[in-house]
Image (cartoon, grey):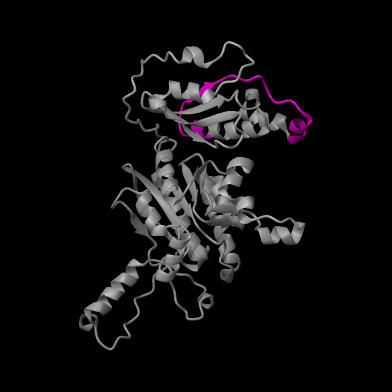
Amino acid sequence: MATTSPRPPSTHPTDSKARTPSARLDEVDARALEGGGRERIDKQHESGKLTARERLELLLDPGTFVESGRFVTHRAVEFDVQNQKVLGDGVVTGFGEIDGRKVFVFAQDFTVFGGSLSGANAEKICRLMDLATQVGAPIIGLNDSGGARIQEGVESLAGYADIFLRNTLASGAVPQISAILGPCAGGAVYSPAITDFIVMVEHSSYMFITGPDVIRAVTHEEVTKEALGGARAHAEKSGVCHLVAEDDRACLAMVRELLSFFPSNNAENPPMGPTTDPIDREIPALDTLVPAASNKPYDIKDVVRATVDDGHLFELQERYAANIVIGFARIGGRPIGVVANQPMVLAGCLDIDASIKAARFVRFCDCFNIPLVTFVDVPGFLPGVEQEYGGIIKHGAKLL
């Protein structure tokens, strides 16, 4: 366990009371500018990103955040030639509330050593995750990191392994949400991949195992960071990303809404939500939404929205495997999981991607006591050599 060093004696010739008011104000201002200082914070803002603490203020209910590990510092003295250590070591950890419900959250601070993971940094995150699973509260990670801190060698890599273990042990016990708000590369991408949901920000966040430079050197392929691992690539092609936001603020708002649909742990029921939509209302539109001819397409989302409270469907992975629709909604104020075939895409056939997409969502709902409402209109599994060779049998079986 990391220990805090005693506060070093002041080198100022006079005591703090004798200092000028302007000097004391500068000191307060320096403490207020958490992390890497004004220059790095300004650079963070110029790139369209918020700082770690600004993100926490937007994510959590006002005045509820309680920080832990505030005075932890890194151990590798040679990391900084001036032997300067930054309190917190590049990650802000603690707990707070979202809509009055307790959550545990860590926010990587890119202004401090690029948010890189050190041994002490990893210990803070692991301690937070251990406490969250003991208490039975969701874990939210705000990722913005350059990866492992190479100056600490294998200790930083071991830190990732410790985090992966916590992700795995917490899986199915407490909900885990990852917000990718900056770079996330190499081994760092696997922790979000184990969590339940990933939210990315367009044009400022990316995820990949190896970057464009390595790919260029090994395979001679030319690709940009955005095309390789940007939000659009993972939302449309890989399916890694569940939700895409236009900026940090929209991303954190999505996380708050997402959390409202499921319980704090697997021993609780989902929280009821307020609604003015009568549960016994008639829906005349349903008489004509579904065409009589079976070969005529229609949008299943119109059917879902007509059925659920206030016509609100919180869809996940909208751009990936669009032949099946998944997401959260409410009926009578109670959260439900929606799984619906989409006749508008591939006539609603199930393929490998759709099977994997829906199966993972069903498993999550099963873990956290969320009832499923299934809208079925499917001709069957998509035929083809590519599907058979790709393993439609084993992947289709996951959904079954």
Query: Would you say residue 241 is visible in this rendering?
Result: yes
Q: Residue at x 49, y 72 (%)?
A: 75
Q: Nearer the viewer, residue 140 or 284?
A: 284
Quadrant in the picture for the C terminus: top right
Image coordinates for residue 180, horizontal then vertical, percent: 51, 51
Q: Residue at x 49, y 21 (%)?
A: 303
Q: Residue at x 45, y 25 (%)?
A: 305
Residue 362, relative to residue 158: is it above or below? above
Q: Nearer the viewer, residue 206 or 164?
A: 206
Residue occupying the far left of the picture: 17
Image coordinates for residue 336, horizontal then vertical, percent: 45, 28
Is 310 left, or right, of 173 in this rendering? left
Provide the residue span drawn in magenta: 364-390
Residue 285: say if magenta.
Answer: no
Image coordinates for residue 83, horizontal then vertical, percent: 47, 79
Is 326 left, or right, of 216 in this rendering? left
The image quadrant of residue 150 is: bottom right
Residue 379: say if magenta.
Answer: yes
Residue 20, relative to residue 189: is it above or below? below
